[in-house]
Amino acid sequence: MSPRTIIVALAAALLATTGCGYGTNEHFRTDIESIHVEMFASKEFRRDLEFMLTEAVKKRIAIDTPYRLVSKEKADTILKGEILEERQAAFAPDFRSRLPRDKQLTLAVQVEWKDLRSGEILLDRPVLQSVDYLPPAGESEKFAQQRVIDKLAMRIIAGMYDDW
């Protein structure tokens, strides 16, 4: 074997055994196997926000956690929440049209994660998430809603870490 082959093999072995921590389940509770996600409630009159958030949270749980999504009857825990508010802010008006060049969309959500076996509340807190978007660049409010919901789902999952 040439020295170059040995170095390449060692580098490959090193890369295979190290990582940045993504994809591991070491941050999550080991005493929980399953979770049921209830449809998020909403105090807002915006159409479909609660459906979009519920689906985004379910997808994040399936991808990023070791927990199985199951029916309420079979679940160790239940996650539920409520969209409290959607707020829009406009920045940097265009001097000619007087329309905003930059907007911000903020969603406020209350989240509760409960262990159904013991009754213990594992997580009970508000989660706030904002995103900026540019209507003149073709970014719509629907686009901003999807972005803020995706980020909110990730923050909700981060709240499920054992060391949170």
Image (tube, rainbow, N blue to C red):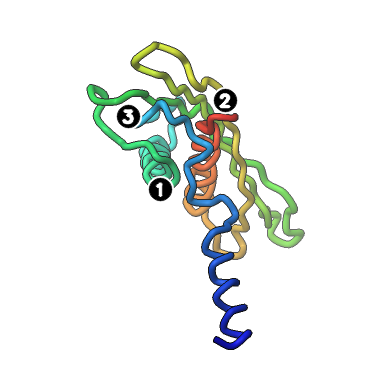
Q: Give the structural element (helix, strand or loop) at label 3.
A: strand
Which residue type does callout 2 highlight? Answer: Pro
| Closer to us: 44 or 164 | 164
Q: Position of residue 36 (x, y in %)?
A: 32, 29
| Residue 157 seen in the figure | yes
Residue 158 in the image: above or below residue 119? below
- The image quarter containing residue 76 is top left
Q: Which mark is residue 36?
A: 3
Q: Earlier in the sequence, mark 3 or mark 2?
A: 3
Q: Give the structural element (helix, strand or loop) at label 1.
A: helix
Q: Give the structural element (helix, strand or loop) at label 2.
A: strand
| Neighbours of disc 1 within 10 Å: few (<14), some (14-19), many (20+) | few
The answer to the question of whether label 3 and label 1 lie on touching residues, with beta carbons closer than 8 A, is no
| Neighbours of disc 3 within 10 Å: few (<14), some (14-19), many (20+) | many
| Pointer 1 residue | 63
Cα–Cα span, label 3 and label 1: 15 Å
Pick the quarter of the image with the C terminus: top right
Which residue type does callout 3 highlight? Answer: His
Residue in the picture at 42% in, 19% down: 114
Q: Earlier in the sequence, mark 1 or mark 2?
A: 1
Pick the quarter of the image with the N terminus: bottom right
| Pointer 2 residue | 126
